[in-house]
Image (tube, helix red, strand yellow):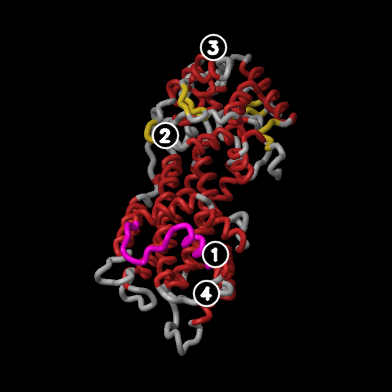
Amino acid sequence: MSSTNTESILLGEDLTIGEIWQASQHPERIDLGNSQIQRIKTCRSTLDRINKKEEPVYGVSTGFGHLENKWIPPEKQSQLQINLLRSHAIATGDQIPEKITHIAMILLANSLAKGHSGIRLSTLKRIIFFIKHQIIPITYTIGSLGASGDLAPLAHLALGFIGEGDVSYQGRRYSGEEILEELDLSPLELKAKEGLALINGTHFITAYATNLLHQTKSLLKCSLLASALSIESLRATDTPFRLEIGQLRSHPGHLTISNIMQQILDGSQIISSHKDPRIDHKTQDAYAFRCIPQVMGAIWDALAYLERVVRIEINSVTDNPLVFPASDEIISGGNFHAEPLGFPLETSCLALIELANITEARVSRLVSPFTPELPAFLANKPGIESGYMIAHYTVAALVNKLRGLAHPNITDNIPVSGNQEDHVSMAMNTAVRSDEIFKLVKEVVLFELMMAIRGLNLVDHQSSSSILEEVIEHVNNSIPFERSDHVIHHTLTAFKDLYQTGKFEEIFDRYIDFPQDFGI
């Protein structure tokens, strides 16, 4: 489905990544259609009917994991679900950011609304109430193995729904009992299978992946602006972005990046000023400039892989067992296993680290004392001033830290639950790691942006392209240019603040035709 900014976003329908993001920004638009309501009711009726036969059904009338053969009589099945949440809510580490938890709740509700999880409509409506009122259960980053779903963090989430966990609401932390009293809600009593349905999915991993895709599009725009400004500062050529080069290889990302870079540099008098071989004796540039389409294109294609998988995952049912009303069956499987997410998330982590690597290579040239186009170390008076020499040290330290985060979690496996769950994906750790990687890479990109603009400010130069001139003007109007040595930390902080305003992306979007999706 597609929706405007005023249309309802119907849970249980096939939603786009953009619609999931819109739902997190405008939760009041979330709704359930009549067909979804009927599916949920039919699914629950099927589960209740099968459960009355008093035959062992995993997670409904049995224990969990290695306790799968322990029979639970009907009168104790509600307690089984409460005990499940209490015993599984043992995550630790940092608190998961509220925006991630909010997205995870939306993904959970969308999965449950598909009508194969067996929950009651009243239970789903409690989740939707939390989403719409932005009541965010408190949960933690470490505990999920990315198989059997995100059990531990989702258990903390589910405790919030029944009034036992802690939640954040309107900037204040409440206990479960307090939030029920504050909002005049009755305690939610779980019935057979409902606790398992709430915690047996990949919703936190998918939420991190969804957020990563959204954030990375903005960062790539800033990175491409920064790389273009470095090209201008160091008088590199735009020849590598010619489409006929990319067409001989035909990788989608390569062609996309070449097209964008051509748009960014279009009309630059700096580029045209050194095209004459009698003036510019360089026959070709270093790889960090010449291979931007190949490297950034590969990064683009890696993110397209993640985007394709997330599109599928946000519309999937990933708990266990699954209810199939049409065949009157409850079937146990392994849709909770996050291996399909783990691979593209690992690839995206490596892609972002590689973005930092090629960015550092350009930063190194911006400060190099052997670069004739700019003063050594971007100092106004090299020697008496150090300029941005140590700024490069910080970039190197950031990249070193990123390389330490490159090890893939997905290659590890630790069997659990008495060896019943003998292969796990560890994709939740990858998801959390991807957020840390993104933040570090963003800093590296902002260093290049800051230093490339400084390079242009230090020397006389002709006009750049319209978009780059506007970026330079916006920066210089917002952050006073200090020609001599100064506390660079303050300047970097100002660039971070400027990035958070979204102004760089706004300028970019006014000039550049940027594809809506990576998977073009």
Q: Earlier in the sequence, mark 3 or mark 4?
A: 3
Q: CA distance from mark 1 to mark 4?
A: 11 Å
Q: CA distance from mark 1 to mark 3?
A: 70 Å
Q: Which mark is residue 73?
A: 3
Q: Which mark is residue 463?
A: 4
The boundaries of the magenta stretch are 467-488
From the viewer's perspective, is residue 435 above or below residue 421? Answer: below
> In the image, what residue type sits under mark 1?
Glu
- Measuring 58% from the left and 15% from the top, which residue is drawn there? 186
Compare residues 239 and 148 and report the one nearer the observer: 239
Mark 2, other Cα within 10 Å: few <14 / some 14–19 / many ≥20 = some
Q: Earlier in the sequence, mark 1 or mark 4?
A: 4
Q: Which secondary structure, mark 4?
A: loop
Label 1 sits on residue: 470
Which one is closest to the eye, mark 1 or mark 2? 1
Q: Is residue 52 magenta?
A: no
